[in-house]
Image: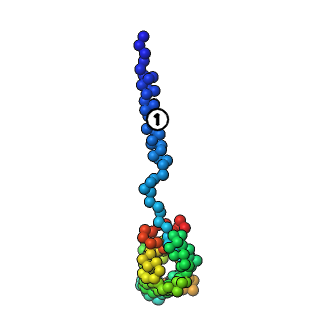
Amino acid sequence: MKRSTAPRRAARLRRSALPTALLAAAAVLAPAGDAVAAPVPDLVCRLDAEVNFDPPLGALVREAEVEGHIGYRDCRSPSGAAAELTDIVFHVQGTGRFGALPVPTFEVEGTGAGTWNTGDDGTLYFNGTIAKGSPVPDRTLTSGPLAGDRINGIQIPTPRFDKIDVDGVAGFDVIGQVCFWNGEKGRCTAY
């Protein structure tokens, strides 16, 4: 009587599939040897800013001078690169622009200068939109400690009620959180 080879063939296939399945599972579970670590910021700071437009920006005035301050306070250094830097206030000036479509926008561009808590001077360039929940305008430290660091984060601007009139909006208070990055920028909300 002749024996069926089907059961033996199925058993052989199961045995040969087992090592392949184990190797695949090991590859998925093993840590990646070449994984790139996420960037770590030089500083994480509380944002405290005020910008003023002269004349007020609105439907009739689309461009105005900007002046005010951008303060970085209560800073800490996750990377350890700038543990001594805890506070700076940049006095800023530049240009503000108003756009009405599709929604009202306020854009700012300019420079600022300030002194760190250590006594070191620094300068700043900024350019971007002031909008609730939007990223802070692009900022780069142009001199002083951490020169070249780029700054990102989240902002919450509030029009100042004493700065709103029939001609438009003449100022914002802005709070939020920012991170200073040397090289590649990561997500500031992770800190």
Q: Nearer the viewer, residue 39 or 124?
A: 39
Tell me where residue 186 appears, x and y as whole percent: 47, 66
The residue located at (44%, 79%) in the rendering is 147
In the rendered structure, which amino acid carries the disc numbered 1? Leu
Tell me where residue 179 appears, x and y as whole percent: 50, 72
Tell me where residue 149 appears, x and y as whole percent: 44, 75
Vertical arrangement, residue 40 with respect to residue 73, above or below: above
Q: Quadrant of the C terminus?
A: bottom right
The residue located at (44%, 72%) in the rendering is 182
The residue located at (50%, 85%) in the rendering is 120
Residue on which the image places disc 1: 18
- Residue 44 seen anywhere in this rendered image of the structure: no
Q: Nearer the viewer, residue 94 or 104?
A: 94
Is disc 1 placed on a helix, strand or loop? helix
- Residue 33 seen anywhere in this rendered image of the structure: yes
Tell me where residue 92 appears, x and y as whole percent: 47, 86
